[in-house]
């Protein structure tokens, strides 16, 4: 009986390892819409779209985002996955993400960049981190990094 159990565990382990190798990493084709931000009483907020190339023959379930928002290299907020989403197989799979600055960050942003805002100069908005997903119970992480120069006028 223990030989049968060992054989079963070995086969299951082999299938699991083969499954891990069959999931190819996703590639980020582009990040769109970073320039669409709103300034409100609580800070900056906005949404953007990450366009993926999913070379796998199956979709990937997006589980979350561990992505930070930076203005002129100063961390000011976090990105969230507003709802459960699936990245379809092939080119052009889109993932909609939202961001908002942390409480009190707007004051820090204004203090650090006041002259840039008044003179109409650009500031650099960047997002950096990882989007987490899974397929068939196997997790994966895709790095996302993009920046956009913006003119923010008060």
Image (spheres, rainbow, N blue to C red):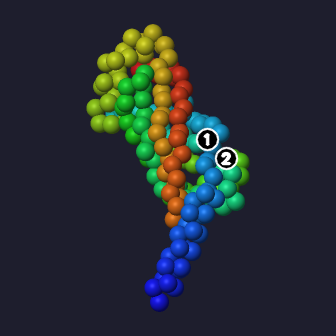
Please rate how many residues cluster around mark 2, counting C-alpha atoms within 10 Å: few if below 14, some from 14 to 19, many from 20.
some
Disc 1 target residue: 28
Residue at (50% x, 20% y) in the render: 151
Which of the two labelled residues, at mark 2 and mark 1, occupies the earlier sequence position? Answer: 1
Could you tell me residue 58's position as x and y percent? Answer: 66, 61
Residue at (65% x, 39% y) in the render: 29
Residue toward you, 135 or 70? 135
Q: What element carries label 1?
A: strand
The image shows residue 61, relative to residue 42, as above or below, that is below
Determine the image quadrant of residue 107: top left
Residue toward you, 6 or 97? 6
Could you tell me residue 9's position as x and y percent? Answer: 50, 76
Q: CB under 8 Å between callouts 2 and 1?
A: yes
Residue at (33% x, 37% y) in the render: 102
Residue at (69% x, 51% y) in the render: 55
Which label sits on residue 80? none
Could you tell me residue 108's position as x and y percent? Answer: 31, 24
Q: Specify the quadrant that holds the C terminus.
A: top left
Determine the image quadrant of residue 40: top left
Disc 2 target residue: 53
The image shows residue 40, relative to residue 82, as above or below, that is above
**Can residue 108 be seen from the camera position used here?**
yes
The image shows residue 13, relative to residue 113, as above or below, that is below
The image shows residue 6, relative to residue 61, as above or below, that is below
CA distance separating discs 2 and 1:
6 Å
Please rate how many residues cluster around mark 1, counting C-alpha atoms within 10 Å: few if below 14, some from 14 to 19, many from 20.
some
């Amino acid at each position: 009986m223990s030989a049968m159990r060992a054989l079963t565990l070995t086969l299951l382990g082999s299938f699991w390892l083969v499954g891990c190798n069959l999931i190819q990493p996703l590639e980020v084709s582009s990040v769109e819409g970073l320039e669409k931000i709103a300034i409100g009483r609580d800070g900056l907020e906005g949404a953007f779209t990450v366009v993926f190339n999913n070379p796998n023959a199956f979709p990937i379930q997006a589980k979350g985002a561990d992505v930070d928002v930076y203005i002129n290299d100063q961390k000011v907020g976090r990105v969230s996955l507003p709802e459960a989403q699936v990245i379809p197989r092939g080119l052009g799979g889109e993932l909609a993400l939202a961001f908002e600055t942390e409480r009190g960050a707007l004051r820090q942003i204004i203090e650090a960049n006041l002259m840039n805002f008044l003179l109409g100069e650009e500031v650099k908005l960047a997002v950096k981190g990882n989007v987490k997903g899974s397929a068939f119970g196997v997790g994966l992480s895709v790095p996302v990094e993009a920046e956009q120069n913006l003119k923010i006028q008060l």
